[in-house]
Image: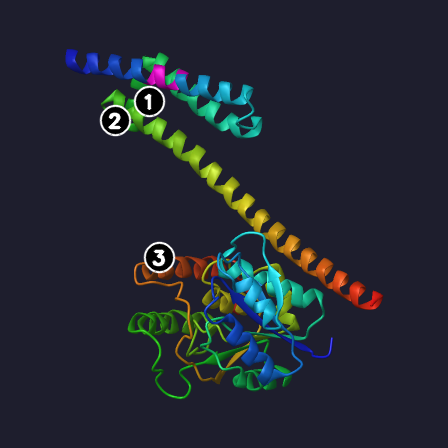
């Protein structure tokens, strides 16, 4: 029992450090304009959720009982995984949307470029 | 615009044969403009196609076959063409078959015509892996399309203006041939197949290698499923 308690405390310390690290990195990236505000929100929220759970051991025990998981570190790992999967899914949808827009834009540019070229050629012929 | 149709050739690194393909198409088809959509080739495809007398639509970065074809369909639609016939840039398709495809399109019985390599008996120039994939997708597509299709992966395809309108707005981006059939079915459009001659490649390589074929099958199956989910309810009645 004592071993589990020690493991639990170590895990909570590690997850606290990692979540704080994530929040600091995101805030630093925001300050340096490496990430846009709208895309930083998901990461900050994920970091915050993991930080709160790491600081609130009793909540992990309560969630563990509710989910039927007797080992609290597994509860933290499961929740962290779900939160980060949600963040990754959100970014997959954003990337898909950007890719669609990018293709439509590239096609439009190609067509406009083609039409300009045709106009220049016909204008050149008319001048001759 | 002297012709009511355009020949569309998507090309990516086809320098070894694009000039030959364009010249043959121009010789055989006379007035019809030949549009090569260059998918940001890293070789001399663009230059050679232009030199051979093709109109060239270079896309600003690599879009893949579907994105490249859709760019061509969009341009053809904007320029007012009634029909577009797509052939590949590797010389497999014989442009002498194009009038047969156009004849069926002009008869107005369908919106899309597939040049099929299997209507004249078994085809000699198809790899066993591709042959296996074609048989698999024939079985998958039969109940979805409500009729058999002999050559669902054929890139020798003619479309009329109605299909052009649809494709210029919505077209599968990767491995588009099979999905395009389901997209048309969603719109309650019809297709027909006509027998065509397929020749060995003059150059270039197939985009579907042995390793990629599994990804291809999964990707296309998922694309077909997504399109089925988009079917309007009345189409099933």
Q: Say which chain tag 2 marks.
A: A
Circle 3 packing at 10 Å, graded few (<14), some (14-19), many (20+), is few
**Magenta span main SS:** helix
Quadrant showing the N terminus of chain B: bottom right
Lower sequence index among marks 2 and 1: 1
Q: Are marks 2 and 3 on the same chain?
A: no
The span from disc 2 to disc 3 (Cα, nearest Å) is 37 Å
Query: Does the magenta segment cover residue A19?
Result: yes
Position of residue A39 relative to residue B67, above or below, is: above
Q: Which residue is the site of mark 1? A: A63
Can you give x and y, in whole percent of width and height, for residue A108 in the image? 65, 54
Q: Which residue is the site of mark 3? A: B215
Q: Which residue is the site of mark 2? A: A69
Q: Residue at x 73, y 58 (%)?
A: A116
Q: Quadrant of residue B76?
A: bottom right
Q: Residue furthest bottom?
A: B120
Q: Say which chain tag 1 marks.
A: A
Image-based side of B40 in relation to A115, left or right: left
Read off the magenta span: A15-20
Find numbered disc 2 in the image and state the secondary structure of the residue it sits on.
loop
């Amino acid at each position: 029992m004592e071993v589990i308690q020690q493991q639990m405390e170590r895990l909570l310390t590690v997850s606290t450090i990692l979540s704080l690290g994530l929040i600091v990195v995101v805030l630093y990236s925001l300050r340096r304009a490496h990430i846009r505000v709208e895309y930083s929100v998901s990461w900050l929220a994920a970091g915050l959720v993991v930080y709160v759970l790491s600081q609130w051991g009793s909540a992990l025990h309560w969630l563990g009982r509710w989910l039927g998981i007797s080992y609290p570190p597994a509860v933290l790992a499961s929740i962290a995984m779900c939160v980060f999967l949600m963040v990754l899914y959100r970014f997959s949808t954003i990337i898909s949307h950007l890719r669609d827009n990018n293709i439509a834009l590239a096609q439009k540019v190609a067509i406009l470029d083609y039409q300009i070229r045709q106009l220049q050629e016909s204008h050149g012929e008319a001048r001759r | 615009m002297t012709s009511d149709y355009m020949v569309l050739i998507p090309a990516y690194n086809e320098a070894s044969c694009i000039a030959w393909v364009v010249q043959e198409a121009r010789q055989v088809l006379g007035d019809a403009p030949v549009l090569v959509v260059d998918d940001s080739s890293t070789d001399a495809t663009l230059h050679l196609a232009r030199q051979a007398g093709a109109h060239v639509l270079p896309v600003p970065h690599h879009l893949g076959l579907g994105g490249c074809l859709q760019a061509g369909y969009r341009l053809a639609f904007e320029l007012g063409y009634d029909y577009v016939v797509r052939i590949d840039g590797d010389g497999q398709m014989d442009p002498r078959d194009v009038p047969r495809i156009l004849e069926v399109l002009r008869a107005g019985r369908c919106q899309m015509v597939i040049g099929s390599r299997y209507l004249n008996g078994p085809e000699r120039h198809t790899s066993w892996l591709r042959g296996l994939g074609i048989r698999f997708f024939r079985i998958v597509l039969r109940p979805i399309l409500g009729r058999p299709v002999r050559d669902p992966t054929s890139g020798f395809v003619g479309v009329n203006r109605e299909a052009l309108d649809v494709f210029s707005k919505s077209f599968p981006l990767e491995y588009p041939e099979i999905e395009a059939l389901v997209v048309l079915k969603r719109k309650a459009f019809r297709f027909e197949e006509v027998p065509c001659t397929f020749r060995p490649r003059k150059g270039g390589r197939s985009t579907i290698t042995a390793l990629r074929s599994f990804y291809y099958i999964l990707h296309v199956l998922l694309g077909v499923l997504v399109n089925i989910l988009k079917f309007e309810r009345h189409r099933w009645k």
